[in-house]
Amino acid sequence: MTPTHQAAIDITRASLQMLRETIDDLPDAALDWSPVAGMNSLGVLVVHSLSSTLFWLGNGAGRLRSIADYRKDDRLPSFKTTGITADELRRRIDETAAEAGRILAGGTDAHLAATVTFPEDPSQDRTGAACLISGIAHLREHVGHAQAVRDFWAATSPQNSWR
């Protein structure tokens, strides 16, 4: 594993821990709640964050995958997430942390320097290093979104009965 891949796993694990802490003491009902129509729920944000993280980290560590397949098989279904429990989300977060470690353990300097191409969407072509950064940045972006949704839930929950 390169120092860059090690840094990626360190930041990914820290980000996943932040995501886990965001949902840890919430009731399951909070996971499907949305502050406004059209805004993603915590369940959607978590599931989408996990699949996108593994997609981008994989492409940055030589595990190339079609972006069209990712969009169809992982991304689209994640935005339909409903009825997921906090226990299930915690399990998925933990599994993602472990899988990210396995993926990044095989990362090489050649993977970082390689250009990852997506023939079905060339606008997404980038180096392996940029794939890692994309994955981490996207994860942190959604950690912030999840934290905001949690704060909205807390602000609107009657007497904060969820605590």
Image (cartoon, grey):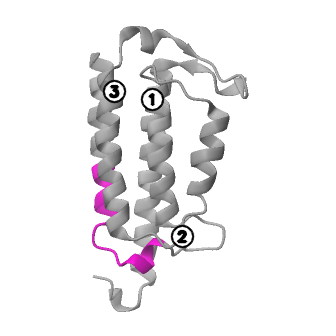
Distance of label 2 from label 3 (alpha carbons):
30 Å
Front-lying residue, 92 or 19: 92
Distance of label 3 from label 1 (alpha carbons):
7 Å
Kindly identify the amino acid type of the residue bearing the numbered disc 1: Gly
Q: Earlier in the sequence, mark 3 or mark 1?
A: 1
Residue annotated with mark 3: 104
Q: Residue at x 48, y 19 (%)?
A: 128
Residue annotated with mark 2: 82
- Residue 128 shown in magenta: no
Kindly identify the amino acid type of the residue bearing the numbered disc 3: Leu
Q: Identify the secondary structure beneath mark 2.
A: loop
Distance of label 2 from label 1 (alpha carbons):
26 Å
Residue annotated with mark 1: 58
How busy is the neighbourhood of tag 3: few (under 14 within 10 Å), some, or many (20 plus)?
Answer: many
Q: Quadrant of the C terminus?
A: bottom left
- Residue 30 shown in magenta: yes
Q: Quadrant of the N terminus?
A: top left
Q: Provide residue 93's location: percent of width, then percent of height.
A: 34, 52
Decide whether the magenta segment is chiefly helix, strand or loop.
helix
Q: Residue at x 58, y 20 (%)?
A: 126
Q: Identify the secondary structure beneath mark 3.
A: helix
Q: Furthest-bottom residue in view? A: 159
Task: Please report the bounds of the magenta region as a residue range.
Answer: 16-31
**Compared to 46, does 161 lie above or below?**
below
Q: Residue at x 44, y 60 (%)?
A: 146
